Amino acid sequence: MKTAARKILILACVLMISPVLMAQQTKITHIAVYVKELKRSSDFYKNVFGFPEIDEPFKDGLHTWLDIGNNTSMHLIQAPWEPVTINKINHICFSVPSMDDFVKNLERLKIEYEDWPGNKNKINIRPDGIKQIYLKDPDGYWIEINDEYK
């Protein structure tokens, strides 16, 4: 094979393989959540979900980093509050091993939850059998909880 043809073949192979390799290397590392009161939000996520606090580099009293599992963290960031538009469609989701145990903890903490249509203290069951509920954090962000835990 001639050198020019070989170079073209190699370039074509690289161009076809590169997107596949890049997609395999891309992963989520953290979720950043803008909060009004850092302590209130930190306490909420630690008490409701049991997320342990991890070291954060800023040390400025405006950040809390939490380990949310699967080598992923949540960064709570306090900044001057400006009201945000929040809709249930825009949510984050956490899966739990036991919906019953999670709901008992919510009830103990007196935290309201609802199903997708908005019925208070009801659990939604998706067509695939997964149970899910929705609740709001202290700043009004929607959180889905489901039992699709694996």
Image (cartoon, rainbow, N blue to C red):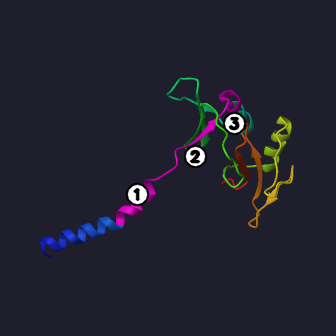
Q: Amino acid at mark 2?
A: Asn
Q: Measure the alpha-carbon separation of dots 3 and 2.
A: 16 Å
SS under mark 3: helix
Q: Pointers 3 and 2 in contact (CB under 8 A)?
A: no
Report the quarter where the C terminus lies: bottom right
Precedes in sequence: disc 1 or disc 3: 1
Give above or below for 90 relative to 110: below
Which dot marks residue 22? 1
Q: Residue at x 24, y 72 (%)?
A: 9
**Is residue 96 visible to us here?**
no
- In front: mark 1 or mark 2? 1
Give above or below for 136 relative to 64: below
Precedes in sequence: disc 1 or disc 2: 1
Q: Residue at x 61, y 38 (%)?
A: 34
Which dot marks residue 45? 3
Residue ID for mark 2: 70
- Snapshot quadrant of residue 129: bottom right
Q: Amino acid at mark 3?
A: Tyr
Which range of residues does the magenta coloring cover? 17-42
Q: Pointers 1 and 3 in contact (CB under 8 A)?
A: no
Q: Position of residue 136 (x, y in %)?
A: 75, 43
